[in-house]
Amino acid sequence: MFGRSPSFAVLFDMDGTLIDSEPYWLASEQALAKEHNGTWTHEDGLSVVGMSLDESSKLFKDKANIDLEPQEIVTRLTSDVQSQLQKIIPWRPGARELLFDSRNTT
């Protein structure tokens, strides 16, 4: 029953599990607020960690006092974070080695 069968896993949320992109999100939020003459502090960013993008974008809009719709905020932030991830992926300790370990292939 517990022999040498292949292991499989599905990860629906890799942030915090495989990578740590929170610094990218925090920087992107601050930059977007500044671009629109709004204010968004590091503490504001930490307060929305773990929320859905829909929820956090509404709070961001209100708190930063910017004139963008929530979906536009999500699009802008997501695009900026993806751009940063294309340059450097901030792997969590051991995550990259686990994913690319040749013994984990079938």
Image (spheres, rainbow, N blue to C red):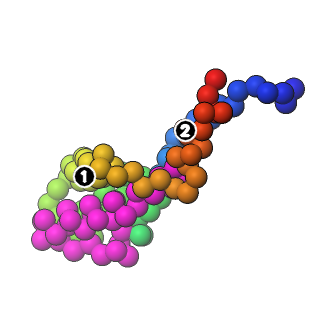
Nearest the eye: 44 or 26: 26
* Residue 69: mark: none
Task: Give, as a three-letter code, the residue at label 2.
Answer: Phe
Residue plotted at (33% across, 60% down): 24
| Nearer mark to the viewer, of 2 and 1 | 2
Rendered location of residue 15, percent (x, y): 47, 52
Task: Give, as a three-letter code, the residue at label 1.
Answer: Asp
Q: Is residue 47 magenta?
A: no
Nearest the eye: 65 or 93: 93
* Residue 80: mark: 1
- Upstream in sequence: badge 2 or badge 1: 1
Q: Is residue 23 magenta?
A: yes
Rendered location of residue 47, percent (x, y): 42, 70
Residue 44, image quadrant: bottom left
User: Magenta span covers which residues?
Assistant: 16-45
How far separated are the C-alphas under marks 2 and 1? 27 Å
Residue plotted at (61% across, 28% down): 105
Q: Quick check: 55 above or below 11? A: below
Residue plotted at (17% across, 64% down): 66
Q: Main secondary structure of the magenta part?
A: helix
SS type, badge 1:
helix
